Image: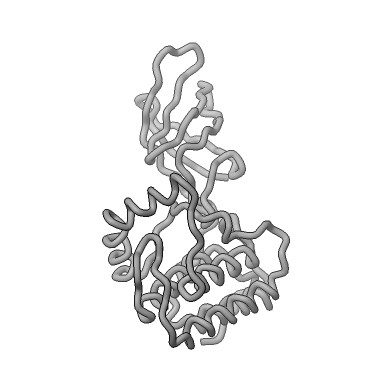
Amino acid sequence: MFRCRESLSSSPVVIRVRITDIGRSGDGSLCRGRPVTVDSGPKQATATWVSGGERYTRAPKARRWTRAKVKWEMSVKRRQLRFATLDEAVRDAEHLLANGYELAGNWDLTQCCHHLAVLMDYPIDGFPRFPFPINVGCWLLKHTVAPGRLKKVLESGVWPERIPTDKRTVPNTGGKDAEAVARLKQAVERLQTHTGSFQPSPLFGMLDKETLVKLHRIHTAHHLGFLLPRNAGTPPK
C-alpha cells in the first residue's frame, strides 16, 4: 500500500492506494502520467492524472479540476548501496541468489542482472538503434541536458529514479536467477578486461573505460538496491 497526504480542501486527507493501481518504472519508482482511482474518505474523489508531482482531481458532479501537490512514500524501502568495484556488485547478486530476496521494486533478480549485463555489453558490441521518434529524443538529450546529468551522476554516485527503461533490455518475470547472475558476472569480467575501443552511447557519446566502469557501478547499485536479502547476513567484500 502507498500512503499519501494532500490538501484537496482546507484540511489534509489521508489516501491509501494499492500498489498495482499506480504506474511504476522498472526500478520501482512511480511513473508519471498514469490514471488511478482512490478513496479519499468521507468525500469520494477520482484521481484522473498524476504528473510532475501533482495530482489532478475532480469531485463528483464538479465542473472544475483541482490540482494539488502529492507526496508518495513507499512502504518498503530499498537498500542504499555503494559498490567500490563491479566485483563487489557481483558478490551482492550472488548473495541474493544464495540466500533469497524480497522485492522492493518491480524487477526480480533475473530481470535486474539481465538488464545490467546487456547495458555493460553495449559499449563493446555497439548500441542498438532506437526507432523514431525515440532516436530524435536521444539526439536532443545528448546535445542538451545529458552531459550535465552524466556529470551529476558521476559526482553524486547516485542513479536518478524515474528514468525510462528500454524494454528490450528487460526479460519477462520467471527467469532463472542463477543464469542471470552468471551472465552479469561474465559481463563484468568482459568490461573490466576489455582493451579495445568502445562504442559511443546514444545519450552520452564516447566514454573512456574508467568512466564506463564507474557509471555501471552506480547503475548496478541502483537496481540491486531494490532486492532485499531475506536474512541479516551481508555479502563478502
Viewer-nearest residue: 141 or 98: 141
| Residue 151: quadrant of the picture | bottom left
| On screen, residue 84 above or below 66 | below
Viewer-nearest residue: 65 or 45: 65
Regarding residue 141, the answer to whether it shows in the image is yes
Applied colour scheme: one colour
Q: Is residue 9 left or right of residue 37?
A: left
Place of residue 167 in the rendered image (x, y in percent of width and height, measured from the top left): 57, 54
Disc tally is 0
Viewer-nearest residue: 91 or 39: 91
What residue sits 42% from the left and 51% below the top? 135
Place of residue 208 in the rendered image (x, y in percent of width and height, measured from the top left): 35, 78
Place of residue 76 in the rendered image (x, y in percent of width and height, measured from the top left): 54, 56
What residue sits 67% from the left and 57% below the top? 172
What residue sits 39% from the left and 69% below the top? 200
Place of residue 138 in the rendered image (x, y in percent of width and height, measured from the top left): 38, 53
Regarding residue 228, the answer to whether it shows in the image is no
| On screen, residue 106 above or below 18 | below
| On screen, residue 129 above or below 92 | above
What quarter of the picture does the N terminus occupy? Answer: top right
| Residue 51: quadrant of the picture | top left
What residue sits 37% from the left and 31% below the top? 68
| Residue 20: quadrant of the picture | top right
Q: Is residue 154 left or right of residue 91?
A: left
| On screen, residue 136 above or below 122 | above
